[in-house]
């Protein structure tokens, strides 16, 4: 079982990570008028699916109380969460000191940097790091919760997840936090939306969902493709107001994306192709963080309107920086900035 999870995660699921990461680049950078790309840009499945993948594979660590793997996971999250804001802070302040302009049109203070550290987002910071903040918080919360409540923790987590969804669909979450501009309060709204997705994926791992997929790989592939097509092209669910991960649609989308890529017949490719895929899909976390730092100056240098070609180029540049950065710092924990 564990070998299957590892094999598919390194290939099919890693391809999914790359696909999601490129979609996030489109979401942040693309401003042209192609209808199909705009539809992809305005969809909300990318971050919820990242949460799904992350917490599906967390279950194995929690269930076995694997402290070493837990420490490694937290290192992989904490290093970029703490270092990238400092890099962003330095780059933008140097731009302002030397060229009298930066992305924010002012000198960034230590207060701005501190605020970014507190919740992973700020008016003047790397907004995408709220994702890592949630991953860190939920990881620690799940581990402590499972240690304290032993055999009952999953049922209680599921109960809390249902309450969170009720908060969404009754509009309590959105109504409570929409009027606030403070990033801390906005982060609470996002917490309520992403918590159920994390618990749901965690619960699927508990029932060995990956084994069910593998035993029915052809059916899983076909059904996943069909439902992804329907979810993407038709408004099957009623739209509700919320923040970045609103609605039960994101749970269904994440489930079918995970299923589709998990059962992709990657093993039919030759060893050279598999090595290329493994290399191309390796640096998604670095690309996720770096593209946000680069995009403003990339737009100034290359194009005012974000085109699809610009998205590809921005992704490639972020990939190359991640690739060289990882190899330079491969023997240190700074490698986690890029991989």
Image: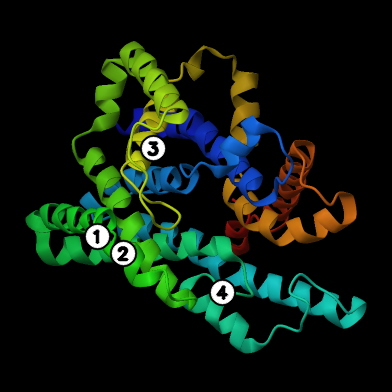
2 or 4: tag closer to the N-terminus: 4
4 or 1: tag closer to the N-terminus: 4
Who's the residue at 33% across and 40% down the image? Answer: 238
Q: Which residue is mark 2?
A: 173
Q: Which residue is mark 4?
A: 122
Which image quarter: residue 313?
top right
Distance from the alpha carbon under mark 3 to that under mark 1: 21 Å
In the rendering, which numbered label is found on residue 167? 1
Whether pointer 4 and pointer 3 mark residues with C-beta atoms closer than 8 Å, the reply is: no
Distance from the alpha carbon under mark 4 to that under mark 3: 27 Å
Distance from the alpha carbon under mark 2 to that under mark 4: 20 Å
Which image quarter: residue 222?
top left
Residue density around tag 4, few if under 14, some if 14–19, many if 20 or more, within 10 Å: many
Who's the residue at 86% across and 83% down the image? Answer: 97
Q: Position of residue 132 (x, y in %)?
A: 48, 61
Q: Position of residue 206 (x, y in %)?
A: 20, 41
4 or 3: tag closer to the N-terminus: 4
Q: Secondary structure at mark 4?
A: loop
Q: Position of residue 82 (x, y in %)?
A: 56, 72
Who's the residue at 73% across and 74% down the image? Answer: 104
Distance from the alpha carbon under mark 2 to that under mark 3: 22 Å
Residue density around tag 2, few if under 14, some if 14–19, many if 20 or more, within 10 Å: many
Whether pointer 1 and pointer 2 mark residues with C-beta atoms closer than 8 Å, the reply is: yes
Distance from the alpha carbon under mark 1 to that under mark 2: 5 Å
Q: Secondary structure at mark 2?
A: helix
Residue 183 horizontal side relative to residue 69, left or right: right
Which image quarter: residue 83?
bottom right
Q: Which residue is mark 3?
A: 254
């Amino acid at each position: 079982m564990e070998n299957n999870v590892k094999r598919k995660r390194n290939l099919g699921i890693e391809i999914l990570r790359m696909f999601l990461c490129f979609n996030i680049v489109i979401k942040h950078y693309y401003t042209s008028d192609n209808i199909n790309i705009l539809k992809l840009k305005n969809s909300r499945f990318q971050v919820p699916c990242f949460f799904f993948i992350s917490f599906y594979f967390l279950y194995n660590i929690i269930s076995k109380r694997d402290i070493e793997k837990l420490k490694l996971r937290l290192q992989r999250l904490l290093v970029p969460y703490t270092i990238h804001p400092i890099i962003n802070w330095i780059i933008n302040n140097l731009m302002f000191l030397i060229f009298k302009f930066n992305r924010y049109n002012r000198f960034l203070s230590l207060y701005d940097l501190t605020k970014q550290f507190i919740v992973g987002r700020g008016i003047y910071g790397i907004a995408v790091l709220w994702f890592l903040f949630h991953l860190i918080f939920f990881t620690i919360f799940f581990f402590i919760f499972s240690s304290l409540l032993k055999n009952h923790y999953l049922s209680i987590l599921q109960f809390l997840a249902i309450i969170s969804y009720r908060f969404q669909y009754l509009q309590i979450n959105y109504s409570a936090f929409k009027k606030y501009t403070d990033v801390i309060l906005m982060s609470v709204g996002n917490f309520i939306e992403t918590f159920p997705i994390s618990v749901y994926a965690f619960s699927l791992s508990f029932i060995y969902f990956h084994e069910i997929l593998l035993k029915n790989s052809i059916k899983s592939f076909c059904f996943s493709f069909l439902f992804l097509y329907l979810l993407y092209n038709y408004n099957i669910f009623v739209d509700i107001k919320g923040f970045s991960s609103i609605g039960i649609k994101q749970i269904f989308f994440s489930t079918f994306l995970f299923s589709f890529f998990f059962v992709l017949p990657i093993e039919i490719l030759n060893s050279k192709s598999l090595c290329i895929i493994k290399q191309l899909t390796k640096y998604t976390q670095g690309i996720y963080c770096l593209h946000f730092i680069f995009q403003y100056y990339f737009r100034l240098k290359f194009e005012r309107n974000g085109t699809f070609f610009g998205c590809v180029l921005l992704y490639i540049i972020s990939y190359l920086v991640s690739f060289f950065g990882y190899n330079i710092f491969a023997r240190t924990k700074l490698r986690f900035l890029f991989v």
